[in-house]
Image: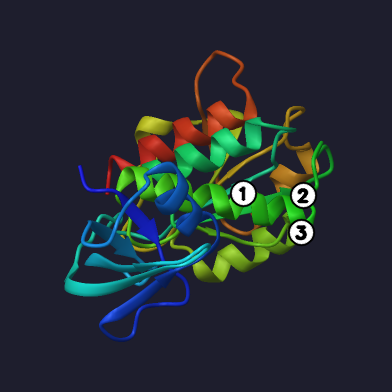
Amino acid sequence: MTSRYYVSPPIVDDHATLTGPEAHHLLHVMRSKPGDEVLLFDGSGQEFRARIERLARSTVELAVIALAAVDRELPFDLTLAVALPKGDRQAWLVEKATEIGVTRLVPLRTERSVADPTTGALERLRRGVIEASKQCGRNRLMEISAACAWSQLVGHAAHAATTRLVAHPGGAAIAASAPAAGAVTAAVGPEGGFTDAEIAEAAAHGWRTIDLGPRLLRVETAAVALASILSSRG
């Protein structure tokens, strides 16, 4: 399989330049040489076949040979809003959500949240999106938005998403909650769950509660399970 590399800013002509971690990997890990071919993507949905032209200490110059629009996205917009867990579990969640095809990940602030990601933490997670996209073949990057308060998400999604689901014990079975046509927003709460007041607020804005089964799931497990079920119905 040809190696894939992410290019930023987007490619606009027949040349591209790799810098930063992408150039480092090509130069010092893969030990590539002029004439080698690679695949590039820039988040636009296109995939570029390119040939290495020149290697420098920290940059790689490439000539674009061919491009193709390769769509590996879900047929609907899927936003996954999650009260993030602590530590490395965040990176695992981002990796799996990217592979599943989630359009957008929204870190939630709820009454029982245990993690409020800093700007630096969000940037590290976005780098994780790039790495996962390189592996799974996505040509559009999953968006990771700034942290959002529960009330803000609940009200915004009422206007932006056709289907609005919140994971909560005692809700409807997930089998009965296939998304309708249009955008879907699904929410997973923190380790302690959503409060009764938060669930009531969501219900007042037309959200449906769904039950993910009798076993107690970690936040990241619940989020990935829910995204997987929804993506399989697209």
Residue 134 picture location, percent across and down: 37, 49
The outermost residue toward the bottom is 13
Residue under pointer 2: 117
Q: Are marks 3 and 2 in contact (CB under 8 Å)?
A: no
Quarter of the rendering containing residue 94: top right
Quarter of the rendering containing residue 13: bottom left
Q: Could you say which is closer to the camera, residue 217 or residue 14?
A: 14
Q: Residue at x 25, y 82 (%)?
A: 14
Q: Earlier in the sequence, mark 3 or mark 1?
A: 3
Q: Residue at x 48, y 34 (%)?
A: 224
Q: Could you say which is closer to the camera, residue 74 or residue 156?
A: 74
Residue 231 picture location, percent across and down: 34, 44
Residue under pointer 3: 119
Amino acid carrying mark 3 in the image:
Thr
Residue 132 picture location, percent across and down: 43, 45
Q: Residue at x 55, y 29 (%)?
A: 222
Q: Could you say which is closer to the camera, residue 227 or residue 101?
A: 101
Query: What SS does tag 2 mark?
Result: loop
Q: CA distance from mark 2 to mark 1?
A: 10 Å
Q: Residues within 10 Å of mark 2 (few under 14, many from 20)?
A: some
Q: Residues within 10 Å of mark 1 (few under 14, many from 20)?
A: many
Q: Is residue 142 above or below residue 230?
A: below
Residue 2 picture location, percent across and down: 22, 48
Q: Residue at x 50, y 26 (%)?
A: 212
Residue under pointer 1: 125
Amino acid carrying mark 1 in the image:
Leu
Residue 205 shown left or right of residue 72 in the figure: right
Q: CA distance from mark 3 to mark 1?
A: 10 Å
**Residue 46 in view, yes or no:** no
